[in-house]
Amino acid sequence: QVQLVESGGGLVQPGGSLRLSCEASESILSLNVRSWYRQAPGKERELVARIISGAGTTYADSVKGRFTISRDIAKRTMYLQMNSLEPEDTAVYYCNMKNAVGSRDYWGQGTQVTVSS
């Protein structure tokens, strides 16, 4: 069982930046579909960004040009750099890593991001 531990959330003013990290307890080489989701109060969980080995990255329209997903295989870590944050970005952010067929599918515990003045 792979454990995913997130960090980097917090309170930031509008226009500010945060970088979320998601560190795995073991190698993520085989978990080649790596994603960040978020869930705001009263809303469904939504996909924010995804990176697939050999297939590039995708982003939700609401974060394109502001968020960047990346990963460091050697450090077993995935990142989400969030710039120009808006109050609408306030949510609990979850990382997810799985293999292509979905037989191995792991979630982090979530980290709160609050954008407020």
Image (tube, rainbow, N blue to C red):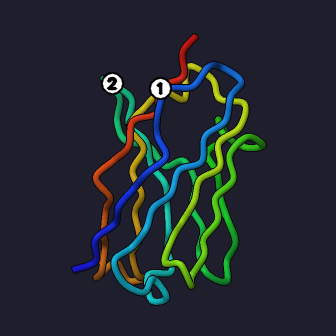
Q: Which residue is at a point 38% across and 83% down the rendered structure image?
A: 101
- The earlier-in-sequence mark between 2 and 1 is 2
Q: x, y (%) of residue 26?
A: 36, 84
Which residue, as the protein is rendered here, is positioned at the far top? 117
Which residue occupies the foreground of this view, 61 or 4? 4
Between tags 2 and 1, which lies in front? 1
Q: How many marks?
A: 2
The quadrant where residue 50 appears = bottom right
Image side of residue 102 versus residue 27, left or right = left
Q: Which residue is at a point 71% across and 38% down the rendered structure image?
A: 83
Image side of residue 50 versus residue 37, left or right = right
Q: Amino acid at mark 2?
A: Pro
Q: x, y (%) of residue 24?
A: 39, 73
Q: Which residue is at a point 40% across and 63% down the rendered structure image?
A: 96
In the displayed structure, 96 sits above or below 54; it is above
Q: Kindly state the secondary structure of the residue where label 2 is placed.
A: loop
Q: Amino acid at mark 1?
A: Thr
- The residue at which mark 2 appears reads as 41
Query: For the residue carrying disc 1, how many other residues have a C-alpha within 10 Å: few (<14), some (14-19), or many (20+)?
Result: many
Which residue occupies the foreground of this view, 7 or 87? 7
